[in-house]
Image (cartoon, rainbow, N blue to C red):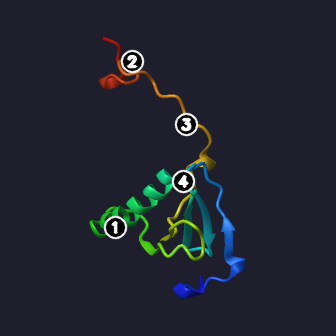
Amino acid sequence: MDRYQLGIGADAVRPVRSTGVMHSVYALGDHLVLRVPKDHREAIADTYTGSVAAPVAHAAGVRTPALVVFDDERDIAPVPLSIFERAAGEPLVHLGPPRPRPAVGSPRTRPGGLAP
């Protein structure tokens, strides 16, 4: 990672717990994350999409982490690599399973919460 002059030592690289199936994610210190796609066609395609979509979204004012590095040289790994700014907050995996939502049309989803 020295080639990017990020000032991140090997001791600052830590795996991040994730439920994703397309990428492995590693913290690079406290402010950056490395996303490494699985060596699978769809995961790699997703990485290319992100390399285009993330900068466009960020430039348009969408609150999304900025893409810092996109490396398609494949000399570090057999797949393209992405380094993003690390977003503040906790991964959704730490929140537990989603709460059940009331069915559409139930009293809790009608205006005012009243039955007809």
Alpha-carbon span between mark 2 and mark 3: 21 Å
Name which of mark 1 and mark 3 comes first in the sequence: 1
Which residue is the site of mark 4? 40
User: Is the residue marked by circle 1 packed among few (<14), some (14-19), or many (20+) residues within 10 Å?
Assistant: some
**Disc number lying in front (3 or 4):** 4
Q: Residue at x 27, y 66 (%)?
A: 60
Residue on which the image places disc 1: 58
Looking at the figure, which quarter contains the C terminus?
top left
Return the x and y of residue 26 as percentages of the image width and height: 62, 66
- Mark 2 to mark 1: distance in Å? 40 Å
In the rendered view, tell whether residue 40 sits above or below residue 58: above
Q: Amino acid at mark 1?
A: His
Seen as rendered, the residue at the extreme top is 116
Q: How far apart are labels 4 and 1 at the CA level?
A: 27 Å
Identified by mark 4, the residue type is: His
The disc label shown at residue 98, or none: 3
Sequence-wise, the earlier of marks 2 and 3 is 3
Give coordinates of residue 50: x percent, y percent.
41, 61
The earlier-in-sequence mark between 2 and 4 is 4
C-alpha separation, residue under disc 1 versus residue under disc 3: 28 Å
Query: What amino acid does circle 2 point to?
Result: Pro
The secondary structure type at the circle numbered 1 is: helix
Instruction: State the residue position of label 2.
Output: 107
Q: Quadrant of residue 63?
A: bottom left
Image quadrant containing the N terminus: bottom right
| Pair 2/3: label in front | 3
Density class for disc 3 (Cα within 10 Å; few <14, some 14-19, many ≥20) is few
| Type of amino acid at the residue the image marks with label 3 | Pro
